[in-house]
Amino acid sequence: MDEPSPTTDPLTNQFGSLNDLAHDLASLQDLAMRGSWRSILDQVSRARSLALLSNPHDHLIYLSYNVLALTKLRRFTDASADLDSLHDFSSNHYKYESYPQLYPSRSGSMVPFSLRFIHAQLPFKLGNRQQGLDRFYLLLSFIRQKIEQKGSNSFQESAKIWRKRENFVLHCLIGHHLGAKEFNVCLDLIRDLIDHDYLDPVLISKLGYIQMQVGDIVGAKGSFHRVEAMLNEGYSSLSEVEFRNLVNRNKALVYLVGKDYVSAVREYEECIERDHTDVVAVNNKALCLMYLRDLSDSIKVLENSLERVPTVALNETLVINLCSMYELAYVNHSETKRTLSNWIGRVAPDDFDASCTRV
Amino acid sequence: MSSTPQGTHSLAFRVMRLCNPSFPVDPPFRLDPADLFVGEDMFDDPLVASNLSPLLSTHVSTATDSSDMSFADRYLLHHPSDAMGFSDLLLLPQSFGAIYLGETFCSYISINNSSIFEVKDVIIKAEIQTERERILLLDTSKSPVGSIRAGGHYDFIVEHDVKELGAYTMVCTAWYNDGGERKYLPQFFKFVVANPLSVRTKVRNVKETTYLEACIENHTKSNLYVDQVEFEPAPHWSSTRLKADGLLHPADNLSAGEIVKPPILVRSGGGIHNYLYQIKLSSFGSEQVKAKRSNILGKLQITWRTNLGEPGRLQTQQILGTPMSCQEIELQVLEIPSLINLDRPFSVHLKLTNHTEREMGPFEVWLSQNSPHEEKFVMINGLQTMAVPQVEAFGSTDLHLNLIATKLGVQRISGIMVFDTIEKRTFDPLADVEIFVESD
């Protein structure tokens, strides 16, 4: 399926490191991986004011990080304003061929695709759901045109990248329709993904969860059986451990819905044994313990995970669950929650929504 | 034993409704590095693409190393499906939510000792109170909790099938010894049970078959997955559900021939779904049914599922058929001439059936007189009263009425009366029959 990529010569490879792609990109990337979005805003601001960005593509990449950082910090109006400063993504200002001295023999759009994605996603956060949906569907149409174009020009690698973007946007749309409980649209979109050859065990598992959520238990079981059958069909998007854990977690969910919490816990423990960073298994196991009347142990499981693997365990859903358990277990839960909240303040990335502790 | 003011209690109840957890959905801002580090058309040049790919792949989030403080999964996509924002992590119910008739109320109850002393001889009770009844959910007096240490707690889970509408109060009470004094702690938790759906039915008869149309309307705040709607017929009746032939959209197929059937989801707040049943009387049963004058067809049993398969179940009242078959004496029109002329006698062929288990008659048959409200234009020609001999139990007899019409156009034969001369009872067993009277 994939041709082996030609080996790159470090002497002639112009993209040996991130900093070859944009000014001090490695630093921006490092900050982003740590979730230090405020520092990113500082770095962008400094680079702009000190005129360190010489090329148009530098400006665009810095703008992308800036807009992304603003969204991560939930400053959606500011993000939208910054994005709007570009006016028109298809303008010639943003084409490589407009600067032949800077980009000899390169053509096409230098707009990072993320900007188009953020442009479509932002309206949802600003309360304009219809505008967001319109932008996503227009984006989908735009991507499909690009795929055709690249195909007819024999730009194989580029076509592959654009197909990845098609897969991505379809998933975004499913998420937005799911949020509005438009299930039949979600099913249509999933069919669309399968028809375009994006069939994948994680996708079918998600389908199963959607069916479960809605109440179609029989349908969900069918989907999970399908996922298990895919174990031997060579899907490379998951490692062996990830795939096996996925199958166990799907089984656990079926047990959970049938109120057989003991068996569900057993499945989740198998996952954790195989991969102690499987935070889905950890979180869901804790919930099962609670439904088994063992509130103390459910709290311990969640607290342990925060201690042992904080970078994976620290997510808003897990914290909300833990706080709900504290509220049930302790009359004086405010103190316990404040302790948690303080710890989160020290450890969490800038984009963590601390309001989830309800302190 | 007096009720101690709330503030001085060592123990306190904490409760949480345990309906199913749910999957939160929140589409995230997570990216692919190829969409951020370079322009979107950068990969057009295959040499550039091949130089870039090793660099990009080292920056894609792979297996997480828990020792590094990397929150990569909040920023980069690990798998394409991450873009959906459909978390596999389950979320505990965050509010009490709505509760409906037919569901099961389930609650976690924890009693906590927030004082610095141990409390002893603890007895706990939990009870549901409605307008109509009190139901005991939990009573530890037989198997005592004993003592609860300082800072300790004791947990229970209670369940109750909700069968009544309206206001409910869950009353949790504890009796305990607190440093020599016996204390009593009552705590009250209120909620309201609403009606999730309404069912409208319509019964139609076509010859020997009865059809039942049922329309289910969803009054809840969420889409209802209707698992099953079954009609349970009364004794001697049988029913079949009629469905439109499987109209499967060709695009319903997953690859490898599997089908994802779109589930039947009745929209929240007023959505409806219709069901049709064909109901027949078994021939053995028909006479018993008619004798008992029973016109009960049966009941509808509805099961649905909400969040993560949470089940609910309701049954309707008995659904009644039309009263036609509960008459003792039945009169049927077998034949009317197709051409009826003004002022010319015509004969109507009738059948009189005795649906009782005793012999009836002999009868007298006539047409009732003009009433002040209605003038009659169809009357008996000849002897105004006709004699009909006895009819045995469950038997029938034929008779021919000789009639004449005195006005043109659409007219009615109405008011054929059947009088049982022994029991001295009059029956009016035939609905009006329309005829068309033409000129000569």
Image (cartoon, rainbow, N blue to C red):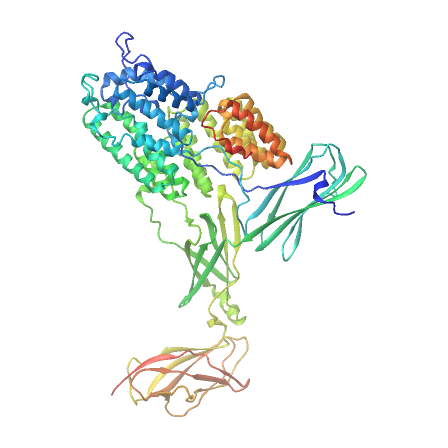
Residue at left 45%, top 61%?
B200
The residue sitting at the bottom extreme is B383
Residue at left 37%, top 81%?
B349
**Quadrant into which the C terminus of chain B falls:** bottom left
- Compared with B226, B176 (above or below) is above
- Compared with A7, B263 (above or below) is below
The residue sitting at the right extreme is B180
The residue sitting at the front extreme is A49
Quadrant position of residue A261: top right
- Compared with A103, B16 (above or below) is below
State the image coordinates of residue A44 (x, y, percent, origin top left). Answer: 35, 21
State the image coordinates of residue A76 (x, y, percent, origin top left). Answer: 38, 33
Near-viewer residue (B181 or A270)? B181
State the image coordinates of residue B94 (x, y, percent, origin top left). Answer: 53, 40
- From this viewpoint, is residue B336 visible? no
- Image check: A272 left or right of B271? right
Near-viewer residue (B106 or B297)? B106
State the image coordinates of residue A21 (x, y, percent, origin top left). Answer: 30, 17
- From this viewpoint, is residue A130 visible? yes
Near-viewer residue (B126 or B312)? B126
Q: How many marks?
A: 0
- Compared with A273, B100 (above or below) is below
Residue at left 35%, top 24%?
A65
Quadrant position of residue B347: bottom left
The residue sitting at the top extreme is A11
